[in-house]
Image (cartoon, grey):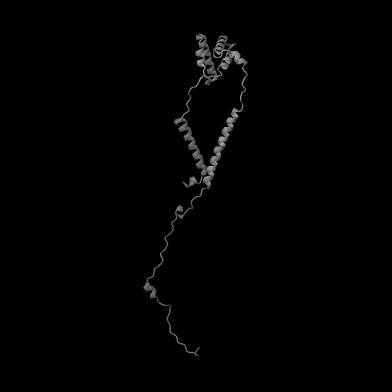
């Protein structure tokens, strides 16, 4: 445990991997997967859009039901332009289908392909990919800054001082001070006893 605390970078990497795995596999794929609902012909690939419009043009040529044609293309604002573009590409290859597509465009819009040809072309917005790339870069930098701040806080956190028990050492118990009884202290024998006499004038 102490070795893990001494390596905050390793802890951050492990936490990132665990969090990413839980978010992607558990929540992203298991609990809350992405669901696509309400898709229309405008959401198809270009090739499948051509198949759809060609089939619808043939059905309209057989039934002559404008309400059915408009309902089949409801919610697709660019449907007249897509029909007219397809009709122009099929004009030399399949004139019959091209004519059916032009009739379908007239059923959707009363002016037909003439209105589409007269409409000014909308400018194509550029830089969308660059904006997404910049957003991803900003998010990565923000995450890196947060991770760096967490590592710095963990590195500056005070650590408990090591004790002798951490190194497997045990201090010996202190020796008890010797105690002496009251009688022993009173009966102490002096170092030596002697008696002397002194007379003035007899210094030698």
Q: Is residue 11 left or right of residue 188?
A: right
Against 12, residue 105 (above or below) is above
Name the residue at 53% across, 43% down: 151
Against 139, residue 157 (above or below) is below
Foreground residue, 202 or 34?
34
Number of marks in the image?
Answer: 0
Foreground residue, 90 or 138?
138
Instruction: Determine which quarter of the picture holds residue 113.
Output: top right
Q: Looking at the picture, how far across and down is residue 159, in whole percent? A: 50, 50
Q: Looking at the picture, how far across and down is residue 65, in whole percent? A: 50, 11
Name the residue at 38% across, 75% down: 186
Q: Is residue 152 visible?
A: yes
Q: Looking at the picture, how far across and down is residue 132, in whole percent? A: 57, 30
Against 34, residue 79 (above or below) is above
Q: Looking at the picture, how far across and down is residue 14, in whole percent? A: 49, 40
Which residue in the rendered view is the most extreme toward the front?
110
Which residue in the rendered view is the most extreme toward the bottom?
201
Name the residue at 60% across, 13% down: 114
Q: Is residue 55 visible?
A: no
Foreground residue, 173 or 129?
129
């Amino acid at each position: 445990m102490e070795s893990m605390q001494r390596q905050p970078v390793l802890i951050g990497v492990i936490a990132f991997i665990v969090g990413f795995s839980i978010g992607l596999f558990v929540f992203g794929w298991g609990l809350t997967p992405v669901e696509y609902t309400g898709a229309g012909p405008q959401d198809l690939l270009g090739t499948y859009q051509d198949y759809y419009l060609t089939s619808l043009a043939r059905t309209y040529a057989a039934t002559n039901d404008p309400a059915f044609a408009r309902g089949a293309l409801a919610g697709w604002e660019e449907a007249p332009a897509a029909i007219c573009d397809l009709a122009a590409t099929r004009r030399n290859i399949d004139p019959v289908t091209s004519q059916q597509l032009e009739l379908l465009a007239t059923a959707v819009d009363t002016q037909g392909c003439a209105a589409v040809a007269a409409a000014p072309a909308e400018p194509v917005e550029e830089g969308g990919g660059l904006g997404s790339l910049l957003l991803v870069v900003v998010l990565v930098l923000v995450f890196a800054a947060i991770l760096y701040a967490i590592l710095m806080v963990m590195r500056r956190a005070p650590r408990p001082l090591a004790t002798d028990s951490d190194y497997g050492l045990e201090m010996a118990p202190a020796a008890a001070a010797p105690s002496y009884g009251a009688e022993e202290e009173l009966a102490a024998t002096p170092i030596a006893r002697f008696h002397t006499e002194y007379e003035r004038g007899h210094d030698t």
